[in-house]
Amino acid sequence: MNQVRGALIVLLLPVVALLLPSGAFAVDRSKFRTCQQTSFCRRHRADHSARLYKYKVEKDSIHFHLPNSDEHKAAEAQKNKDQQQKGLWSSLSKRILGDDSDSPLDPYVQGTTPTLTGILSNTATETSTKKKEQLKFALHAMEDGLVRVRVTELYGLEGSAHEKARVTYDDLVLEHANFAAAAHALYIPPGDDKLKKAYGDLVQDNLDNFCGLEYGDKEGQHSMALLVRLDSFAMYLFREGENTPVMVFGTQNRMHFEIRRTKDGASEGEEEKDEENANDGAEKNDGEEEKYEKEIVGYWEDGLAIYADGTREEKKVVEEDEHRKLTETELDTRDMWEEKFSSHVDSKPFGPMSVGMDISFPKSEHLFGLPEHASSAVLKPTQGPDSHYTEPYRLYNLDVFEYELDETMALYGNVPLVVSHSAEMGTAGMFWFNPSETFVDVEQGDGDVSTHFLSESGVVDIFMIPGPSPADVYRQYAHLTGTLSLPPAFSLGYHQCRWNYKDEKDVYQVHENFEELDYPYDVLWLDIEHTDGKRYFTWDKNLFPNPEEMQKKLWSQGRRMVTIIDPHIKRDDGYHIHKEATSKGLYIKDKDGKKDFDGWCWPGSSSYLDFTQEKVRNWWAEQFSFNKYKGSTESLFTWNDMNEMSVFNGPEVTMQKDTLNLDGEEHREWHNLYGMMFHRATGEGQVKRIDGDDIRPFVLSRAFFAGSQKYGAIWTGDNLAEWSHLEVASPMLLSLNVGALSFVGADVGGFFGNPDAELMTRWMQAGAYQPFFRGHAHHDAKRREPWMFGDETMRRLRKAAMARYALLPHWYTVFHEASVTGMPVMRTMWMEYPQTAQLFSTDDQYMIGSDLLVKPVTGPGVTETTVAFPTKDTWYDVETLAVVSQAGKEETGVNEITVASDIDKIPVYQRGGSVVSRKLRLRRSSQMMKTDPYTLYIALDKESKAAGVLYMDDEETFGHEKRNEYAEASFSADLGSKSKTIESTVSVGSGWTSKVDELKPQRM
């Protein structure tokens, strides 16, 4: 038996615990479009365009590509080779795809070769193009039960508007190098009797209208099946041994695909409508010009003009939508070739090109995901008799000033992932891979929940994630977009930020106050005012004359610093960043592709770098080198803000959709990717600035997309110092975690406004149990450092921060688990208790990993709180170590208990059967805690057993990945047996094995 050395052990027993040594804020709604004001959403929501689209699989076009056949292996090998060279492949395309046309293979798609392909014909009596319409579909059966479905135009038809493939961005989002095809697949053709035997209830006597694809990772074991209905086109995904599909596609006949065409080919009615719009818009724009008779000298973040006389544009009063509402089946052809919003015009040179699909989850009532919205974690209906909202969930990254709560409005980032969970069907997900503007309706049906996805452009590209457990879903999703990158340990500590710490003296004073009060913190942040005239990578020499000395002084006491760097670049020929970016041609272009786009942001007139391009990302990364970013040191890290991207004088406070990247692709195609690519490039710069590329980066971003978990932390943006915003923080952060973004937080205290001592205390307590822990404030807010609220409140705030620091070993271990398995750090209750239906909608309490239950107090004057304890386990108060709830006979039940929660208490509980590691020596930063001993809190279950894990590495380099420099200790306790054992087994990585003698004994 390996004995645990140098660790204090606290046993938590089921019976007896033993210790063994504000102002008024509101979003300006006139700045942001609704579905009704958005052409593609208005035209296709619900059944408005259903009669134009009815798809049928052409039976003779179906082609099955047998996994592990010589043909398939050759195609995979060639594709991998071509992807390594160019990110595309062309060889063997006609033979492998079974395509009789001259269409070249889509050059943008990457990953596995298709398993089943075919042609879809639109058999509707009337089509949107007035012509015969055909599409290509491809099903990719992948390992671990995943399946990808892509529907595209028939590319390569010479002279057509869709001769070339629609641009998609597999290379920027998907972890295609890790994709693998299912090892085995079986095709069941139309008419085969096997269809009736396996899917009798669905196919009935119509065998000729169905085909099937069964696939799996082991020979003879097809753990998944996809049933395809030919006419009208629909798909049903089944798990092995289940009679009910886990998800279905197209059964509501809401799939649509607007095939590109030239404006010359548009119908006469469409042209007339758009000409009518142009005249309406001209009249409206004349009125706008009258309104702006005053000289405009700038714009504020809310998009309102600032005039030369010092006054500001007033908010508009939101009136009824300009577009009359349509009847259920009425067609709308307005705005198809040109679209206006406020004074802005979208030229739409390629016309209408939206796509959509309905997806349902049978026998499920709970759907989650689609961050980011200031609403509940469970997605509430937007359609149907029980709809909670009238607007669909919108996915379009925007800088929304003073956002409101319980809304489906778009916010700073998005992940187009939905996850269904039910006790009977388990957990399953669907990833809608499309970075253009997207709306999603949710509707609760009779025993199921359905969604309708609508995207402005792109293709239909769906990944079905079959589960069946939460852990399965997040492992499978990690195959697609990657896992969280393990952050440096310091970034899990407390961060102190304000817009702005005004100069070096202010920085030193704040730092010294933390020191004097023994208040732990790890990072001090500087907002935009530290720069020389809002020129990033510079310092105001009057306010910060010695930035390196400042950073080194803080680092000598274990603290780092962060500076803000945004994507907009001041248009100043004397500014070296702008001068070089201009000379190298690195900026996004206007709609004609001739001039660099000019928009307004914090510096005034600004240009925007094209981060969709690898050469631009590489150039940006170079700017972080110490010889270029003068005044920076190894202890300086980065905050990326305004990266939606924010353009104060643009439509919806962002960039016009018809601007072009350096490939000539419209902004509408890649809008939601921009912030993530900026985030990525900044992180790469931090890595490359130090020889050896061995220090982990830390970058905070406001904007995000699917895959952002690989690049750093995310926060929920400009929240308010109000109780309602504290209350919504948990649901918002849980929703982000459902989207696999784990390193997330809401600004402690609220950005806008002034929290009182009680609100600040409750927010600090809650923040200590969210993954990213930062206090932040607007420049108009009163100073709110912990000591600003008096000694009594300061002690409470410090107690909360100390609880965070004591648990850093546990946080780090859970983050490591997320980096390996894909499981979120901050988990909804159903992720850990998937059979306890009473907890499925719960979003005011949550789990940190599998072992800590947290219920933040989010209202004023609270002295008692009701906590829902799963009866599967025993629960211990983390402060008193007392048993609060005993495990019961009913493993799927809930024990609701009212617990004391006065101003000094946040309800946090440890699960019986777990071992949680802490460090109890009071230190002032995580850096000072590195060699401190661990204390193990062993919470016994009803059988007096417990188990847990502690992960360790150097906490800052990539040694754990590159050189196997890590250790993992597994603990087990059995005090119910005669031997009463506590054991530990330590697994040491090969990179540390040779150094094990050097490890200090007190570490473990």
Image (tube, grey):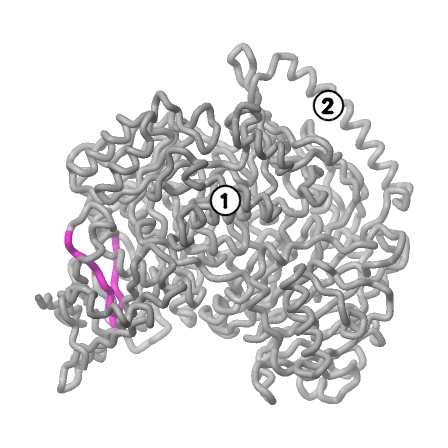
Magenta-tinted stretch? 906-921
Determine crowd level at label 2: few under 14, some 14-19, many 20+ residues with C-alpha closer than 10 A: some
x%, y% of residue 45?
Answer: 70, 50
Q: Is residue 425 visible?
A: yes
Whole-number angstrom distance, CA of label 2 to CA of label 1: 42 Å
Q: Residue at x 18, y 62 (%)?
A: 934
Q: Which mark is residue 621?
A: 1
Q: Which residue is the extreme one toward the top? A: 309
Query: Can you say whether 454 is above or below 344 in the image?
Result: below
Q: Residue at x 68, y 39 (%)?
A: 657
The residue beneath circle 2 is 285
Q: Give the amino acid at mark 1.
A: Ala
Residue 649: in magenta span: no
Side (left or right) of 408 relative to 347: left
x%, y% of residue 630?
Answer: 41, 33
What kind of element bears circle 1? helix
Q: Earlier in the sequence, mark 2 or mark 1?
A: 2
Placement of the N terminus among the 4 image quadrants: bottom left
Q: Nearer the viewer, residue 878 or 623?
A: 623
Q: Residue at x 73, y 33 (%)?
A: 594
Q: Give the amino acid at mark 2.
A: Asn
Q: Residue at x 44, y 41 (%)?
A: 625
Determine crowd level at label 1: few under 14, some 14-19, many 20+ residues with C-alpha closer than 10 A: many
Q: Is residue 409 visible?
A: no
Of the residues tagged 2 and 1, which is closer to the observer? 1
Q: Nearer the viewer, residue 899 or 146?
A: 146
x%, y% of residue 118?
Answer: 79, 71
What kind of element bears circle 2? helix
